[in-house]
Image (tube, rainbow, N blue to C red):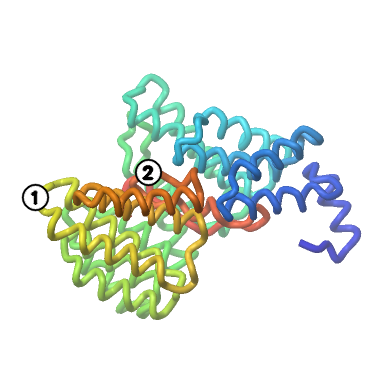
């Protein structure tokens, strides 16, 4: 980014420790990472931090890089992520970009504790995460994604785990006044179990139009009803309206894989459908970035190996590793907030409570 105003340039240097040339180096590290050159990116960030331990952007990017390594078997822990994102917000506490990621990692700490049965500090960790999301909103009051996290966390968890139904309703009502789509997402998160979500989202389309966001949600609701054909129709319409919705092909492919995980007898029927979805994603425009391409090839490799096609599976896995040896090995698709430039406010949202 070129600083056109000298006063702004000085303010940035004084405000967050990003001194001469350092921002350029952090941006270069980001570009290396999303090009599959993660080790080179990490080395460059380590150099920046060694020169200036208060460089908030470098610590933010290192936190995201470490998260990427965590999902890709890169030999790091959640502590490595926490260390760097904590330093980022400590160096630049009013930067909403770092505060948002700080909050997400805060709930990741709690979520990992839930998965591992560590109940002794669970409520404390959930409360801390919510306080971090509230901090984000205090910096940027119209930031809808942190509000939706609060609706889901407060609304989905019981009180003994940090849930608070009154706060969930408060943030849902705030979202309803702020943004039609996120207001609808908030209402959907608080609907009783068993509600017909397909009808709910079709009604929202009737009220708000056939926008890509609403089409995506009704398609996802169709997946939860095991109606993949109808979901694909909605996804195709969403992608026609907005090419960046091509990630929906990954969701559809993962749905077919999940069916096999639930019942291996369905493999012969479901895995070819999954492979077709993944191939469609790889050949859509805009072309997937390297980490997403490698992740998808990895999924396809596992499909081939599961189907008994060991040579084809090995070939695809080698292709994935050649692109990015740290590609995500998680079942869920990598969160897209990992791939936004480190100086851009992220508006990507993923639910901790839903596979799609």
Q: Is residue 246 above or below residue 99?
A: below
Q: Mark 1 or mark 2: which comes first in sequence?
A: 1
Q: Where 321 falls versus 182 (above or below)?
A: above
Q: Which mark is residue 265?
A: 1
At x 70%, y 52%, the residue is: 28
What's the residue at 81%, 51% (across, down)? Answer: 12
Q: Which image quadrant: the N terminus?
A: bottom right
Q: Which quadrant holds the C terminus? A: bottom left
Task: Using the image, determine if residue 305 lies above or below residue 205.
Answer: above
- Residue 135 can be seen, yes or no: no
- Which structural element holds mark 1? helix
Residue lying furthest top: 120
> 27 or 181: nearer the eye?
27
Q: Quadrant of residue 116?
A: top left
Q: Nearer the viewer, mark 1 or mark 2?
A: 1
Q: Are marks 1 and 2 in contact (CB under 8 Å)?
A: no
Q: Is residue 140 shown left or right of residue 215?
A: right
Counting from the top left corner in percent of width and height, residue 261 is at 19, 46
Residue 330, numbered circle:
2
């Amino acid at each position: 980014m070129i600083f056109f105003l000298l006063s702004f340039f000085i303010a940035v240097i004084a405000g967050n420790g990003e001194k001469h040339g350092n921002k350029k180096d952090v941006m270069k590290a980001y570009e290396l990472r999303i090009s599959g050159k993660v080790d080179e990116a990490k080395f460059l960030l380590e150099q920046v931090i060694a020169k200036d331990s208060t460089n908030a952007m470098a610590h933010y990017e290192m936190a995201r890089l470490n998260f990427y390594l965590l999902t890709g078997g890169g030999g790091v822990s959640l502590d490595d992520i926490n260390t760097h994102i904590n330093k980022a917000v400590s160096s630049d506490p009013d930067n909403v970009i770092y505060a948002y990621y700080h909050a997400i990692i805060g709930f990741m700490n709690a979520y990992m504790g839930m998965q591992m049965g560590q109940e002794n500090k669970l409520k404390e960790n959930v409360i801390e995460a919510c306080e971090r999301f509230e901090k984000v909103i205090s910096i940027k009051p119209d930031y809808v994604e942190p509000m939706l996290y609060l609706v889901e966390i407060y609304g989905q968890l019981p009180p003994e785990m940090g849930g608070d139904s009154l706060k969930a309703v408060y943030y849902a009502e705030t979202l309803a006044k702020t943004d039609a789509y996120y207001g609808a997402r908030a209402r959907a998160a608080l609907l009783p179990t068993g509600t017909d979500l397909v009808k709910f989202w079709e009604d929202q389309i009737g009220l708000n139009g056939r926008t890509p966001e609403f089409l995506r949600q009704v398609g996802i609701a169709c997946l939860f009803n095991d109606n993949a054909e109808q979901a694909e129709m909605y996804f195709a319409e969403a992608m026609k309206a907005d090419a960046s919705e091509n990630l929906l092909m990954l969701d559809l492919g993962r749905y077919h894989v999940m069916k096999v995980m639930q019942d291996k007898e369905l493999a012969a029927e479901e895995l070819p459908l999954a492979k077709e979805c993944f191939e469609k994603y790889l050949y859509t425009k805009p072309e997937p970035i390297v980490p997403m391409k490698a992740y998808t090839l990895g999924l396809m490799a596992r499909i081939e190996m599961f189907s008994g096609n060991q040579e084809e599976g090995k070939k695809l896995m080698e292709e994935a590793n050649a692109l990015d040896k740290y590609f995500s090995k998680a079942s869920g698709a990598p969160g897209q907030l990992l791939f936004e430039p480190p100086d851009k406010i992220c508006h990507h949202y993923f639910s901790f409570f839903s596979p799609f």
